[in-house]
Amino acid sequence: MELYHNPKCSKSRAALALLQEHEIKPVIRHYLDDSPSISELSALCLKLNLTASDIIRHKDLDKFESSITGLSDDDILALISKTPDLMVRPIAIKGTKAVIGIPPVSVLTII
């Protein structure tokens, strides 16, 4: 299992703690330091069964003076790759499935 993790995010820390309580040691991806590529984000959307717009933190767009109005999925994925703070978190990935850990207990659905 892989966990897209931001240690400053309380939901991300809670998701990691839940996995560890279930004796799961995920591979941690500090996506803020190791930003996913557009192709990785595209594959992630497929695993989540979501669109690019669904994995963006819409409330943070203003902070980055960004807008996704009129952008294609590829453009949104490029924006997320360039500004990984805009991606929802945490995200747990196992094989062909992934889940957004909001609420954190959601990560347990794919173990």
Image (cartoon, helix red, strand yellow):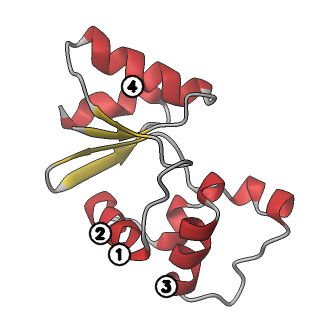
- What residue is rendered at 47% in x and 52% in y? 34
Task: Say if mark 2 contacts mark 1, CB within 8 Å.
Answer: yes
Residue 31: horizontal and vertical position, in percent? 48, 49
State which mark lies toward you, 3 or 1: 1
Kind of residue at badge 1: Ser
Callout 3: few (<14), some (14-19), or many (20+) C-alpha neighbours within 10 Å?
A: some
Quadrant containing the C terminus in the rendered view: top left
Callout 2: few (<14), some (14-19), or many (20+) C-alpha neighbours within 10 Å?
A: few
- Disc 3 to disc 2, C-alpha distance: 12 Å
Residue that carries the numbered disc 3 in the rendered image? 74
**Secondary structure of residue under mark 3:** helix
Q: Of the residues under marks 4 and 2, which one precedes in the sequence?
A: 2
Residue that carries the numbered disc 1 in the rendered image? 39
**Secondary structure of residue under mark 4:** helix
Kind of residue at badge 2: Ala
Residue that carries the numbered disc 2 in the rendered image? 43
- What residue is rendered at 64% in x and 57% in y? 86
Task: Say if mark 4 contacts mark 1, CB within 8 Å.
Answer: no
Kind of residue at badge 4: Val
State which mark lies toward you, 3 or 4: 3
Among the 4 quarters of the image, the one containing residue 91: top left
Residue that carries the numbered disc 4 in the rendered image? 105
Quadrant containing the N terminus in the rendered view: top left
Taking the view exactly as shown, the residue that stands out farthest to the top is 21
Residue 108: horizontal and vertical position, in percent? 27, 28
